[in-house]
Amino acid sequence: MSDPEIAIVGAGLIGRAWAYVFARGGLTVRAWDPDTATLDRLPAEMAAMVAEAGGDPAIARRIRPVASLEATLEGAALVQENGPERLEVKRELFARLDAAAPPDTILASSSSALPASAFSADLPGARRCLVAHPVNPPHLIPVVELCPSPATAPEMMDRAEAIYARVGQVPVRLSREIEGFVLNRLQAALLAEALRLVDEGVCTVQGLDDTVKHGLGRRWAFMGPLETISLNAPQGVPDYMRRYGPTLGRLADDAARGAAFSAAVADRIAAAFPHSATPDGVRARSAWRDSELAALDSHLKTRAEKDR
């Protein structure tokens, strides 16, 4: 069987990262963007991304910018759409993709909030549409949430899962649509309580981040919360639930809700991170974050190979 070819639609930050992921996995990638300047910059930006990550220069050579959407889709096994997070844009774009892509091409959106049914329900090819939600930056954080619409065919989910796994991502398959998918729902619950604790003066911004970074985050880098609790009581999860379930249930009931996301607490937290007060500062700190993620990714892969 020949290697699947990948079409990237939207060559901004997330689109470039996805192009890197697929090309790093050995696949041929064609990329299109409605902005010709973005497309013109793509070869240089991909070469720089590869060099920054210490990757093989051949990765960038497997990524080809294409002038038309139709030519980009030709022969593609999977389309990774990375357009603006606006429903009217997604609807128009998916109508074009459905009309132009070969009938068995998977149409996957990088949407972080919009469910596939919102922009594909009325399409003739709704069966091949799904959300493949990455975490930024997807070339350094491998999880991708695969969320079907009610119309998505199981075989399309199977094929998508196989392609993402083939290029080194960690696909998490959802059984149905749910607002925010899984990762954002978990993130929202933790973040709401974090904002509340800081806003009420229970701890400082630094103290809150240290609690996660040097506490929960240390374990969660290689072990999820459910496996964590399986080791936190002598007789496993049922024992943990008997010992700690009532207390944690009360804490969960008392946890913050949406009111924690206020402008006042945002200003307070922003003051703790002056390096992020300007676009240049955000870019510089993001580059540092990406280098740390790359080092962590390398470490975890090395450990996984040793454990085999």
Image (cartoon, helix red, strand yellow):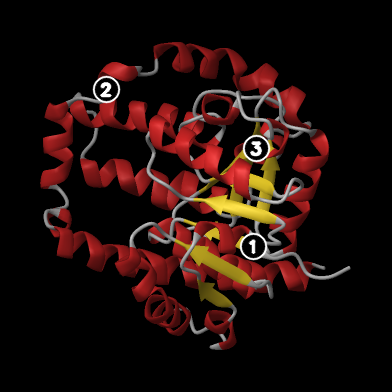
- Determine the CA span between mark 2 and mark 1: 41 Å
Secondary structure beneath dot 1 equals strand
Residue 54 visible in the picture:
yes
Secondary structure beneath dot 3 equals strand
In the foreground, 229 or 78: 78
In the foreground, 292 or 44: 44
Q: Which residue is mark 1?
A: 6
Question: Disc 2 or disc 3, which is closer to the eye?
Answer: 3
Q: Are marks 2 and 1 in contact (CB under 8 Å)?
A: no
Q: Position of residue 8 (x, y in %)?
A: 54, 59
Q: Amino acid at mark 1?
A: Ile
Q: Earlier in the sequence, mark 2 or mark 3?
A: 3
Report which quarter residue 26 is drawn in.
bottom right
Q: Name which residue lies at 51% across and 46% down.
A: 110
Image quadrant where one finds the C terminus = bottom right
Q: Which residue is mark 3?
A: 129
Report which quarter residue 270 is drawn in.
top left
Q: Position of residue 54 (x, y in %)?
A: 49, 84
Q: Position of residue 253 (x, y in %)?
A: 45, 11
Question: In the shown orientation, is residue 308 left or right of residue 278?
Answer: right
Q: Name which residue lies at 39% across and 18% down.
A: 255
Secondary structure beneath dot 2 equals helix
Q: Which mark is residue 260?
A: 2
Q: Amino acid at mark 2?
A: Ala
Q: Amino acid at mark 3?
A: Cys
In the foreground, 8 or 304: 8
